[in-house]
Image: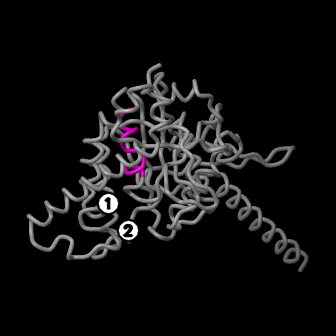
Amino acid sequence: MFRRAFLLPAAVCYFLGVWSGHALDWRGNSAERLTSSVQAASTEIRVGSKGASVAMSVSDIRPEAKLDGKLRVICFGAHPDDCEIKAGGTAALWAAAGHHVKFVSVTNGDIGHWREAGGPLAQRRNAEVQRAAEILGITTEVLDNHDGELLPTLENRRAITRLIREWRADIVMGPRTNDYHPDHRYTGILVQDAAYMVAVPFFCPDTPPLKVNPVFLYFADNFQKPYPFQADVTVGIDAVEARKLDALVGMESQFVEGGALGSADLIAGGDAKRDERRRTVHENFAKRDRTTADKYRQQLVAWYGDAGKSVTAAEAFEVCEYGRQPTKDELRKLFPFFGR
């Protein structure tokens, strides 16, 4: 009887100890990583006289980017096309100068079409942004979150933080948080949430923190409340506008076929109708970039001097107050297109 009374609590204590160890292990590793291309880090719980410590092996995590003196830029969009619209030209300019640019779509876009959905659409949209990346000379990645279902969870915050750290970013871009689409809003929140956490050593300790906080910037938009977009940097993209437009027209699921709110009428009529749609998409995006150049003409002249008067296509960005606050001279180094 005595042995039974002793063994029962001992077994319970053993079970609780094993369970708590697994709980600590789950909290410490990288299994919550959203993208399937990264494996979990292995974690070992060690108990000593001063309590439990967590020892991590990062051998299975994607290696850190190697620094070569070039700028490292990472841009986050909610869907596979957002970054290309907002920063495709500036990314092409950076890439042409040898700098490193990565676009990340935080969802896979799997409901962004009127006829297709699910895995086949996600694969199609991933292929579209991969082709766009080849045209622009950059790297791209699509995270496996469902379109329309993104939330600013702790797991997603960790994923964004890790991506910025792994890229060893100098510049981080993303949308503002006032937007018609919930995925856009929450992508903006997740990027803002990472603006401090990328430097905190024991947040995602499996990925080395950044020693210098990057400069965070917002993409341009036309929303007015609670306050309108305020351009701090405007980049003339005339030299690469043709490449940007080619990349966008190539995203046929979204623009030629109209995406989630399109219809069969847009492409009814065979190849001739599809070619007509491609020309329309090309002109609409060209007009959009011309409008940006005209809207921020004074900014262009301030950055480029008299040459800014003749810029016909542009992209604009606002510095986020949560990251490092650059001086104008530092912005010239981060956007090395303006001359002196």
Residue at the extreme top: 340
Image quadrant of residue 190?
bottom right
The alpha-carbon separation of the residues under discs 1 and 2 comes to 8 Å
Q: Residue 49 appears at what percent x and percent y?
A: 86, 44
Q: Amino acid at mark 2?
A: Asp
Front one among 183 and 23: 183
- Is label 1 in contact with label 2 (beta carbons under 8 Å)? yes
Q: In the depicted view, which residue is nearer to us: 49 or 238?
A: 238
Q: Quadrant of residue 121?
A: bottom left
Q: Residue furthest right?
A: 2
Q: Is residue 156 left or right of residue 109?
A: right
Identify the residue at image location x=47%, y=45%: 75
Q: Which mark is residue 110?
A: 2
Segment tinted magenta in the rendering: 83-94
**Which of the two discs, 1 and 2, labels the residue nearer the N terminus?**
2
Q: Nearer the viewer, residue 24 or 109?
A: 109
**Type of amino acid at the residue the image marks with label 1:** Arg
Q: Secondary structure at mark 2?
A: loop
